[in-house]
Amino acid sequence: MSETSAVIEEIGNAVTKFKADYGKRLDEIEKYVGRAGFPGGGSSLSGFGDGSDTQAAINQHKDKFLAWARKGTDPDGLRSLEVQANLSTLSDPDGGYLVPVEIEKNIERLARIVTAKGEYTKPLSKGGATGGWVAEKASRPETDTPELTLFSPPMNEIYAMPSTTQKLLDMSDFDVAAWLLEEINDVFVTTEGTGFITGNGVGQVKGIIDSALMVANASWEYGKTGYIAGGHASLLNSADKLVDLQHALKPVYRQNGTWLMNDTTFSVIRKFKDGDGNYLWRPGLLENAPDTLLGKPIAIEDNMPDIGAGAYPIAFGDFKRAYTIVDHVSGTRLLRDPYTTKGFVNFYVTKRLAAGISNYEAVKFLKIATS
């Protein structure tokens, strides 16, 4: 028994030492995470050092920016602070000053977002690759190679030009940042949202819906998206067609699939029931959780078309893989114009972006039609 006790004591001591060493390493990791740019850390920037200097520059840039918006003072100092705050200065310095990060972040987006310094180009496969099984020592004949194409949506510019009086800007209790955010959102969010859904690609982004590029029965070819006919010339009245639409999407995309429709269409969908009288729609059970339809989340987008003959009111797809938005690295820029209209200050806000379908296979539509 004494020998057994000695072994147990030895194991206990080893465990105690391991816990002490492990705890010390965890403490070191937590301190490291607190300094570096990891979720929960003290900096939003990557790296190994303390981000306090950069954060101070970001705060200083914001204060200087709002002072410039009020009075137009010290533009040279503002330009130097953009560099210290790690904001892009790659675009023409005469093209205005960069909107502070807090305002830029709040302009909502859809789909996958990438950033580019110039025109964005990405090679895409149009399909056609083949392969097969082969024994260890068997010959390996050449297989078909995929046909490649380039996804290169043209850059377009979106703008807003809110105006206010100099007197209002001079008032100390006037929240310039909140006012700018509201004005930019009013224009940018609405204009971008419309473009992302129905834009024609002429002087604007190319939207996700183009009736000329639809293929019936949810088949697919590069450059065209598939649709399922709803079964009625002018109404949406078949829940079975929603099931067909969902399964028209390949499982690899269906896994992260989301329904997209406007609120009017959603109000029709909410009334659909299965054969046992249960609603197909399910409310989100947790706070801010999306409602679901056939087990997949529903996104409401008011720019989606209403139900009507020949319309495409519902889409189902993995939109982060189907649609790409390219933000120009120059960000959202602002020019201050106190000269055009005396007593007023115009704020000319611009942003360059491109967008388009980057994977035609990853989204399908429901068309209000019999075929």
Image: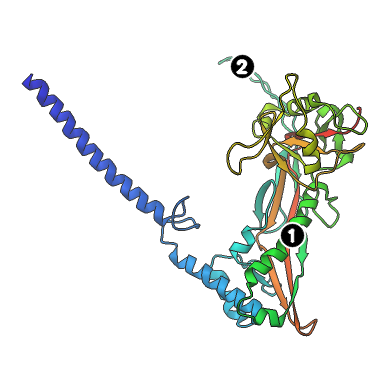
Q: Quadrant of the C terminus?
A: top right
Q: Position of residue 102 (x, y in %)?
A: 59, 62
Q: Which residue is mark 2?
A: 134
Three-letter amino acid code at the position of disc 2: Val
State whether residue 72 appears in this view.
Answer: no
Task: Residue 131: give x, y in percent of width and height.
Answer: 67, 23
142 w.r.t. 339: above or below: above
Q: Residue furthest left?
A: 2
Q: Is residue 112 left or right of residue 216?
A: left
Query: What residue did someone put label 1 on?
Result: 188
Residue projecting furthest to the front: 277
Residue occupying the point 70% across, 28% down: 294
Residue density around tag 2, few if under 14, some if 14–19, many if 20 or more, within 10 Å: few
Please tell me whether mark 1 sits on a helix, a strand or a loop.
Answer: helix
Instruction: Give the secondary structure at mark 2.
Output: loop
Q: Nearer the viewer, residue 91 or 160?
A: 160
Q: Please determine whether, in this image, residue 145 is positioned above or below residue 352.
A: above
Left or right of residue 170: residue 128: right
Identify which residue, 132 or 289, lies in the foreground.
Answer: 289
Viewer-nearest residue: 286 or 301: 286
Q: Residue 117 in the image: x percent, y percent?
A: 66, 59
